[in-house]
Amino acid sequence: MIWDRLFNRDAAAFAPHMPEVDLQSNNDSVFTDARNVGMGYRRQGGQNGERFIALVTPGRLVMQLACPLPGARPMQVIMDIRARYPVEPPAVIVAIALNDIRAVREIKGAKRAIPFLDYLLDLGYAGHAVSIFEGHPTSFRVAVRGSDLLVVDVAMIPFLQPDWQAVAKEVMRLPLIELRHRDGRIEMLDLRGG
């Protein structure tokens, strides 16, 4: 009985939802810190040349997620990323995905909560500044402001503010949105036109 409750509570942590966020945080400084992690201004740890992406928790702490070590991935990974997304690094990339701390406190759980986490780590490995957050309306504008690509877990869209695309178009530097479906499909939205 106790195992069932524990298992169900853990399963709920991985189901797409909008977690409760710290509404008292200074979003400007939190997301600046997250962007700086992706730009290579790491705060702690790491080997020389190692890159990180940033995961902003609902409590508005910035976690560093290590990208593969330099030379660990084939050059084709970088070439594929640049062919798919030909912006010179460092582009500013923001991802909307489940960031519930119960789900992402270890890398195995983070990969379950964020099915495209390896892709985001590869973007960071290729030199782009990547930040992940849940898309809460109190920080949406600040988090995506000045970004070049918004990667969205489609399962999180029902929890976003209704005008999220209009806000993204208004505040992004290059309003490109990549919609990532949990079945592996990918859709691109280019909001630059009309």
Image (spheres, grey):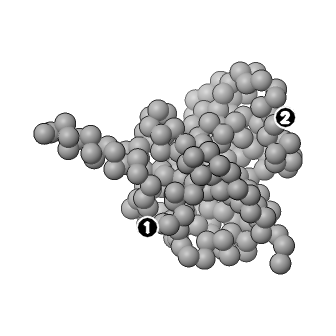
Residue with the mark numbered 1: 23
- The residue drawn where x is 54% and y is 64% is 157
Q: Nearer the viewer, residue 34 or 4?
A: 4
Marks 1 and 2 in Cβ contact (< 8 Å) = no
Looking at the rendered structure, the secondary structure element under dot 2 is helix
Residue with the mark numbered 2: 79
Q: Mark 1: give few (<14), some (14-19) or many (20+) Cα within 10 Å.
A: few
Specify the farthest residue to the left.
Answer: 1
Q: Amino acid at mark 1?
A: Leu
Residue 141: percent from left, percent from top: 62, 69
- The residue drawn where x is 40% and y is 51% is 15
Quick one: quadrant of the C terminus? bottom right
125 shown above or below 173: above
**Count the marks: how many?**
2
- Which image quadrant is residue 83 in? top right
Is there any visible trace of residue 37 in the rendered image? no
